[in-house]
Amino acid sequence: MPASIVIQKPAGAARQLILLFHGVGSNAQDLVPVGQQFAARFPEAMVVSLEGLQPSDFGQGRQWFSVAGITEESRPARIAAVMPAFQALIAQLQQTSGVSADKTTLIGFSQGSIMSLESTQKAPALAGHVIAFSGRFAGAPHVAPVGTAIHLIHGDADAVISVDQSRNAAKQLQALGASVSLDIEPGMGHGINAHMMSLALGKLPAQE
């Protein structure tokens, strides 16, 4: 299992599992500040930032799949090739923490969002919630994931992954009958600002 950072491990049994997946060329440390905010809001959650499965093609950091020479046509196959390992990472942490899929949240940024979103098209469901910052599906979603709420958060000035990807995904998921929310941040590029963070924190139900 690639290196990961445990941001929070509750003293007692974890009631939630919150997993974070970084973008290409980055690493687990990059999303620790995001994870720390979720940890503060949900003190009984186990919060882990995961490291990408592969060394980055760009010489630093990690990646979930290669983007060297990637095209719209080649992207789905590259994701499919690594999806079993991605699913295994999540299953292993669910087993370790004793938290079921319905109490698991996947939070991705950019490429980490792509993996998290694409995982919702596989069965069985890996998580009760997916929060996708600045992400996209590899292709149009074709199933409404059972028991998974999908939350899309995207800056409208994103020059890396167009906000239209999230807009289109929201429409497609709604048409399939999926549980989906879409929040667009005016003037924001490819990143996460404080307001987007606040929106994300509000997507999960409060611990009882």
Image (tube, helix red, strand yellow):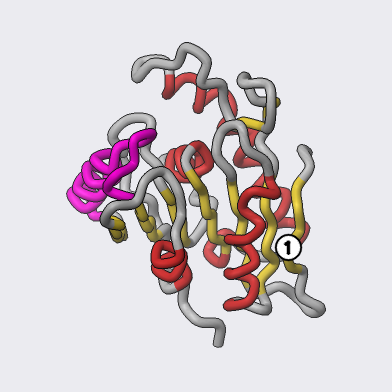
Which x, y percent locates residue 126? 54, 51
Q: Residue furthest bottom?
A: 208
**Residue at image location 28% in from the left, 43% down from the top:** 163
- What range of the chain is rendered magenta? 155-177
Q: Secondary structure at mark 1?
A: strand
* Above-or-below relation of 205 to 23: below
- Residue 161 belongs to magenta span: yes
Say left or right for 163 vs 14: left
- The residue at the far front in this view is 187
Q: How many marks?
A: 1
Q: Position of residue 79 (x, y in %)?
A: 50, 27
Q: Nearer the viewer, residue 155 or 177?
A: 155
The residue lying toward the viewer, choosing from 70 and 59, is 59
Residue 126 within the magenta-colored segment of the rendering: no
Q: Residue at left 69%, top 57%? A: 48
Is 1 left, or right, of 127 in this rendering?
right
Question: If the image is split into quadrants, where does the C terminus sit?
Answer: bottom right
User: In this view of the protein, can residue 123 be seen by the observer?
Assistant: no
Q: Residues within 10 Å of mark 1 (few under 14, many from 20)?
A: many
Task: Give x and y (percent) for residue 53.
Answer: 68, 32
Q: Which residue is mark 1?
A: 7
Side of 93 relative to 16 (left or right):
right
Q: Looking at the magenta stretch, what is its main secondary structure? A: helix
Front-most of 112 and 187?
Answer: 187
Residue shown at 78% from the left, 39% from the top = 1
Q: Which residue is rendered at x = 66% and y = 32% of the image?
A: 62
